[in-house]
Image: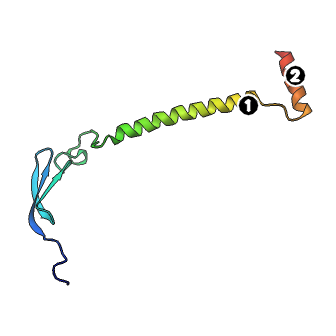
Amino acid sequence: MKADIHPQYFDDAKVVCICGNTFTTGATVPEIRVEVCNKCHPFFTGEMKYVDTLGRVEKFQKRQEQAKTHIAQKTKKIEEKEQNKRPESLKEMLDLAKKQAAS
């Protein structure tokens, strides 16, 4: 191994969670701060809650709503295009005239 290229290793690095839980582990930094640990994570506690630290759930829901409105606008535009479609043949024109006369 080459000398003086590896970071300093701390055998007793302290890990501190937002919930107040602390434990020690080995790391290259003396202290680590985390947002979720095994004492407060929903998988380990069995509680049903979202662990959303950056607003990802709200962003996803916002994108879903935007997609729904986009799809609705697109289908409306397609329907309008179908209604304003010109007949391509004489047969289509006569069929259209028959439908209009019947109604």
Residue farthest to the left, as pictured: 12
Label 2 Cα neighbours within 10 Å, binned few <14 / some 14-19 / many ≥20:
few
User: Does residue 57 appear left or right of residue 63 in this picture?
Assistant: left
x 67%, y 33%: residue: 78
Residue 13 in the image: state x and y as whole percent. Answer: 10, 62
| 90 up-or-down from 9: above or below | above
User: Does residue 78 appear left or right of residue 23 in this picture?
Assistant: right
The dot on residue 82 is: 1
Residue 48 in the image: state x and y as whole percent. Answer: 27, 39
- The amino acid beneath tag 2 is Ala
- The amino acid beneath tag 1 is Glu
Q: Quadrant of residue 93?
A: top right
Task: Look at mark 2 in the image and give the residue it sits on.
Answer: 97
Front residue of this view, candidates 35 and 43: 35
Q: Quadrant of the C terminus?
A: top right
x 90%, y 32%: residue: 91
Q: Earlier in the sequence, mark 1 or mark 2?
A: 1
Residue 70 in the image: state x and y as whole percent. Answer: 55, 34
Residue farthest to the bottom, as pictured: 1
The dot on residue 18 is: none
